[in-house]
Image (cartoon, helix red, strand yellow):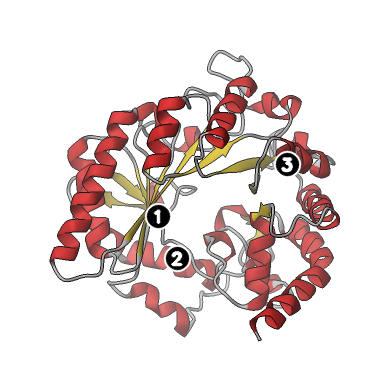
Amino acid sequence: MKGKTLRLEDAGRFNNCRPFSLMLKPVGSRCNLDCSYCYYLKQSSVSEIMELSLLKKAIDQTIQLNNTPEVSFCWHGGEPLLAGIDFFEEVVGYQKIAVNEKTASGFERPLIINTIQTNGTLINREWCDFLRENGFLVGISIDGPQDIHDYYRVSRWGNSSYDKVIRGLELLRDNGVEFNVLCTVNSKSRGRGREIYNFFKSIGVKFIQFLPVVDPDEEWGTDAEDYGNFLKDVFREWWESEDAGNVYVQMFDLALANYIGVPCGLCQFNPVCGDVPVVESNGDMFCCDHFVNQFNYIGNLNSAGLSEIVYSERLSSFGADKNATLPAACLSCKFKTLCNGGCPEHRVLKQSQDFYLNYLCKGYKIFFEFALPYLKQMAAQICSEQR
């Protein structure tokens, strides 16, 4: 195995003042669904509701440590809505107090951004009113038409979740709550990219994330080539329907951003990562949502200050290692700046005397090769509009 190399531009990760966000798990891995491909249940058994004293500490210190125009909190799970509206009322209250304290100390007032990822089954009118009034961006998990969605996303009792998710989505849409859709690309998505994309359009979805299920040893995992062809099919439908500017597909925005050389905003396609550590409901903290394990444990917020944890050498090294452990195949790839090796979680393909390659590499190449002429065209259009 060759040695790691730290780029000079990545050394800033070791500064004790870099901005960060938190992903908080208010009920840990507790969930009312039993999705076959759920990775988090395999990693975490923590399922109690977060104590309010811990919640307040996490919010206060995140706002105090970030001297940035925006401070972001991502509420995740499990199913975070199981914490209840009263819990999230406390969230908003603590954030307002912390912001007022920060501005009273002479700092600019930051904008607080809250995102929440939910399976949608618990959404009702009361939740919609709360989420809208407090400016939460909601990510709702749905895998497409009912036969695809229900194959792997069922209740704890093995029942369909589709109707409840659709009802939740429609309530968000009809009550003016800002939302997007997170759709996994799994084995049942194969060859149905256009159909799934048009399904989302038909129910009023404007923002879509396609998340590949990488689990090579399980039936639900997507094949790398299938994933690349899925993205190609979606892009064709998006382009031919002239949906640019009306429907936003995260992968297309990320590729375009990296192509024109601006920050893409998603860790897996950035050169470095590790700026969104996870807080479990018991205070345990880990480098990343996909690396909740003993090796990537970075402390417990009940017994340590947040600055001690997020500016630790372990978390700094975790982020810098993303680029420092790129295999030779990535370093010589013409698409390196578009994917930057992808998520370290997916680097599972052993290379001879080298670092591991991303399982999705072939799929990324299929999509980027296809999309490159369109990226050039869109980049040229952006440049002309800025003149």
Q: In the drawing, does residue 116 fall left or right of residue 271?
A: left
Badge number at residue 149: none
What kind of residue is marked 3? Lys
Q: Counting other residues with Cα less than 10 Å from the Cα at mark 3, is it few (<14), some (14-19), or many (20 or more)?
A: some
Residue 349 showing in the rendered view? no
The residue depicted at 17 percent of the width and 48 percent of the height is: 303
- From the image, which quarter does the N terminus lie in? bottom right
Q: CA distance from mark 3 to mark 1?
A: 35 Å
How far across and how far down the image is residue 343, in percent?
58, 58
Residue bearing mark 1 = 287
- The front one of 367 and 198 is 198
The residue depicted at 21 percent of the width and 37 percent of the height is: 52
Of callouts 2 and 1, the N-terminal one: 1
Q: Counting other residues with Cα less than 10 Å from the Cα at mark 2, is it few (<14), some (14-19), or many (20 or more)?
A: many
Residue bearing mark 2 = 319
How far across and how far down the image is residue 163, in percent?
63, 20
